Amino acid sequence: MATSVKIRLQSPPADTFPEEVQLIAGARQSLSGLEIRRYSRQLLLPSFGVEAQQKLAKASVLVVGAGGLGSPVLLYLSASGVGCLGIMDPDSVELHNLHRQVIHSEASVGELKVKSAAATCLAINSSLQVILLCDDDIAAQVREYAFALEAANALEVISDYDIVVDASDNVATWYLISDACIVANKPLVSGAALGMDGQLTVYNHAQGPCYRCLFPIPPSQSACQHCANAGEETHSVQLAETTHKLTEKTLPEFDYEAFTSSPLCDAPPPGQQIVGEDQSITCRGYKEVREAHEAHLLLDMQEHHEYTIAALPSSLNIPFSLLPLQQDAIVAAAEVTTSHGIKSLQVYVICRRGNDSQAAVNELRSFGLSAYDITGGFQSWVQDVDPNFPFF
Amino acid sequence: MQLTLEFGGGLELLFGSKKKHQVDVSPSNGHIELTVEALLVWIRDNLLKERPEMFMKDKSVRPGVLVLINDSDWELCGRLEGVLEDKDTVTFISTLHGG
């Protein structure tokens, strides 16, 4: 018989609670019942709890880039109850974004990414828009910036936020955001991804270093797959030294594109014409060669895995990087035996955008072949000949 | 000296798309110890398949490459002068810029 056990149903006076219980009892006043239900599973985490939820609700976060990295960041911040989100991205949603930029949907293809991302964030958590959670009078809201961060606007934009997330896609913006966070004294959470690799770094936090501290010299253009110019290097080193002294006044004037020798966006570099017209053929011209059934050799410079995605029939795939090793195979493939003896066919060279193919033409000519560049590659082929070719 | 070399962040493309290499490297003639500087030269001459300028600049790695020795930043291990030991792992990571 358990008659000796008495259960007291009435709560003891507050001051008899242990300290941590008092904290929750006190905190309840500033989290609504709805919020407690909504965020209960993370409130229950001892390492998170009410205090962190309140900090989150008061926090404002600027996310630069609403792409592959920005998507999960924005989704999780919205869902977890952050008070104020800034979203910045100049781009519009494209079909090939959807497989990884999961904040956007089919219906938003063609729309500005900030619009699409903001709509998803608000659909997940309407309190982002309507509840005043920030004690410095910033209304909780999703703000949109449909433009790229630039030296001229960076400090003004960043100054409104507590934390900055760099989810951008280019070197110039990385330096700009890092510098601006130092000048404005904001912690910076920086992410990057390429293929199956990812990196996450927190800069300017707890006396930690900034991006420029770790990488005073930007990677060369060639390392970023743009064209190199040896003369730029010293220039960059000098700039690196001066840039650590950037201030509110000088940062807006700093030329990040010159410093990193790369644009403040991730667009492919503009095409360069390095072979002459006498060594080139337009896509329309090459289409006629095919239709006339002229004997020739078509070399496709794509990497092998690209070639398996889309290619023209009756072509020989020699990835550009392997070209020097394949000299004998190419020369043999171009040879035909006629009544007058062995003759070498004309060789047409195609690649995705018409850059590698030009370099290849120079190399093939050094092998003694009559090589011609198909100007503009598959990109032009889609525009000028076959809009249904699956250019990716 | 048995070393494990790891290449990431796209650098593996310069090494036949292979990320992890088990190698046997000896100090060059007249040296007792193998420094990181000597290892870089060995990698360039023995392992690198293409575009050396994407891996090295002058005597060091090109700007934008993180070097870790047994998972510690090489800045803490003497950079180029750091001395390697048998069974060490040296990791080279190209900083990524994809968004």
Image (cartoon, coloured by chain):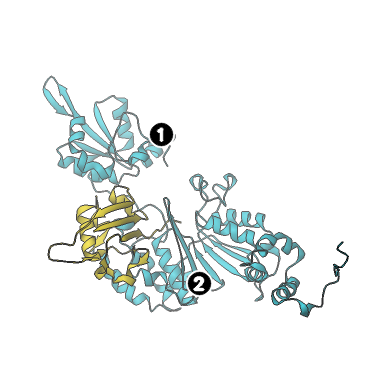
Q: Quadrant of residue B94?
A: bottom left
Subunit that carries the residue with mark 1: A
Residue displayed at 14% across by 27% down:
A343
On the same chain, marks 2 and 1? The answer is yes
Colour used to depict chain B in the structure image: yellow
From this viewpoint, is residue A3 visible?
yes
Q: Residue furthest right?
A: A3
Find residue A106 and report its horizontal and vertical position in percent: 57, 44
Question: Does A6 sit left or right of A86 as displayed?
Answer: right
Which residue is label 1 attached to? A386
Q: Is residue A362 above or below residue B91?
A: above
Disc 2 secondary structure class = loop
Distance (Cα) linking label 2 and label 1: 49 Å
Instruction: Compare residues A356 and A146 and report the one nearer the observer.
Output: A356
Residue A187 numbered tag? 2
Residue farthest to the top?
A339
Give the percent coordinates (x, y) of residue A280. Answer: 25, 40
Chain for disc number 2: A
Image position of A208 (left or right of A35) = left
Q: Residue at x 43, y 37 (%)?
A: A390
Looking at the image, residue A330 sits to the left or right of residue A34; the answer is left
Q: Give B49 or B83, whichever is nearer the viewer.
A: B83
Determine if residue A228 is in view: no
A5 vs A334: above or below: below
Residue A354, image quadrant: top left
Q: Kindly identify the residue that appears in the image at 57 percent across and 59 percent down.
A: A74
The quarter of the image holding the N terminus of chain B is bottom left
Q: Could you tell me the amino acid type at mark 1?
A: Asp
In this picture, residue A237 sits left or right of residue A310: left
Element at label 1: loop
What letter labels the chain drawn in cyan?
A
Amino acid marked by disc 2: Pro
